[in-house]
Image (spheres, helix red, strand yellow):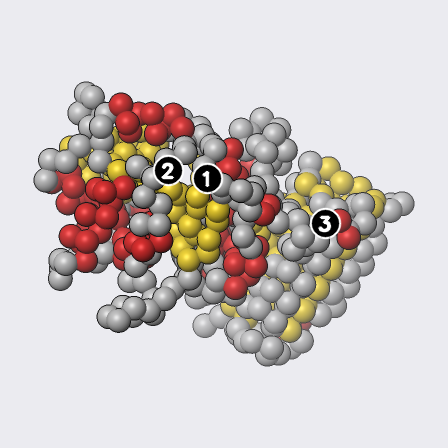
Amino acid sequence: MNKVLTIIMAGGEGTRLSVLANRRAKPAVPFGGIYRIIDFTLSNVMHSGARWVGVVTQYRPYSLADHLGLGESWGFSRMGRKLRVLAPHTGEKDSAFYSNTADAVYRNVEFIKRFPECTEVLVLSGDHIYKMDYRPMLEVHRANRSRLTIATQEVPWEETSRFGLMVCDSKDRVIRFQEKPKKNPLSNKASLGIYIFDLPSLIEALQEDQADPDSQHDFGGDIIPRLIDRGEPVYNYSFNGYWRDVGTIPAYMETSMEALDPTSPLDLESWGLRTNVEQIPLNKQHPSHIAAGGSVKRSLVSRGVTIEGDVRESILSPGVRIGRGARVRRAILLHDVVIEDGAVVEDAIIDKHCRIGRGSHVGCPELGDRPNDIRPDLLSNGTVVIGKGAEIEPETRIGRNSLIFPYVETISVGRIVPAGTTCFGDMAAHVAKPQ
């Protein structure tokens, strides 16, 4: 990896994660108690022996940039190693924001050219949960003398519309590529958003793409199909390890629950993950404390957590407090969430600094299973999502599939939020009834 430059795409808006990505970039969304999603890609890069990394940012990059720093937490501040956050910038003719993935890399070509000793560029997404050593893929790329090598994995046929798909010949050379087909998928061999380009080939492809007035400037939609159609050597690298796209609420919830399953290959303890512990900061958090009357089963509990109630199959981030007699089931509670005495939380994702009032019930099954009124595509499997800083008043009942925006206070509508309701507002105090 001494001659490989790594570019991590971390500018995604994450609209399918709804309020979890409302005030942060998708790669900055917390995961697994103390981590952020981008920590998985960065830890993979570190363990693979990479030396130079550029992280391309765009949407709400502030917390992400603070988290990354100069890469100290992943060993990139030492001599001979470098991590740089590449913020959107303007040139003489460039607009402020990137139009798509290929455009984002193109407008950082000057950064790429700073590393003339590099022969390849490893292009990664910063919003997936996986463990991978990129060195075997690099060996395959070099052995095939490929211009581009794409990591793939077979996915269920019903999920093929979310991926770029490939057809390969008997030597694993890619002969056809189909970007996110709505119907009639060519295969279920899906691109994982992990690419290795020869450096000169990447620059040439980006320049050619920019000159095409009909291009959308996207790797999957433009760059890759153009190389294949022209007969360039593009090869497949089949990856058989653990990989998950957590870009939707159901996927985020399901993958988080996998982290609690001792039979799952998702093993946060053994993967050697790194994160910026100074941001939390963990060294100032007290050890987790289970008080008399409190209990925990099959859960992940971070430092700084206090439990006086009963917790099952849940992930508790630093600073979480569970009151006396409270019950938490299948929930993800981010930093400094407070569940007051006697409250019940079921099948919920609750963002930072929220408070669930005494005796409240989040995810109340008695209120039905109506899909969310605004985003039924995101919330129809029962999960409640509560945005950062929301205050749920005492004795409130919130139905399944409800969506509470950041800093909303539920102080009206008889303290009953029907299933499928969306509560709007920024620092507002109202509940939107379903139509």
Residue toward you, 363 or 390: 390
Residue at left 64%, top 67%?
A: 389
Residue on which disc 3 sits: 282
Residue on which disc 1 sits: 51
Asked whether disc 2 touches disc 1, contact meaning CB atoms under 8 Å apart, the reply is: yes
Within 10 Å of the Cα at label 1, are there few (<14), some (14-19), or many (20+) other Cα atoms? many
* 137 left or right, relative to 82: left
Q: SS of the residue at dot 2?
A: strand
Q: Which amino acid type is shown beneath numbered disc 3? A: Leu
How many marks do you count on the picture?
Answer: 3
Residue 23 locus on image (x, y percent): 52, 65
Eyeballing the image, is 94 above or below 20? below
In the rendered structure, which disc, 1 or 3, sits on the residue that comes first in sequence? 1
Within 10 Å of the Cα at label 2, are there few (<14), some (14-19), or many (20+) other Cα atoms? many
Q: Which amino acid type is shown beneath numbered disc 2? A: Val
Residue at left 59%, top 34%?
A: 272
In the rendered structure, which disc, 2 or 1, sits on the residue that comes first in sequence? 2
Residue 79 locus on image (x, y percent): 53, 42
Task: Say which quadrant the N terminus sits in.
Answer: top left
Residue 344 locus on image (x, y percent): 71, 55
Q: Which amino acid type is shown beneath numbered disc 1? A: Arg
Q: SS of the residue at dot 3?
A: helix
Q: SS of the residue at dot 1?
A: loop
Residue on which disc 2 sits: 4
Task: Say which quadrant the C terminus sits in.
Answer: bottom left
* 116 left or right, relative to 348: left
Q: Residue furthest right?
A: 292
Residue 189 locus on image (x, y percent): 28, 33
User: Which-is-in-front pick, marks 1 and 3?
Assistant: 1
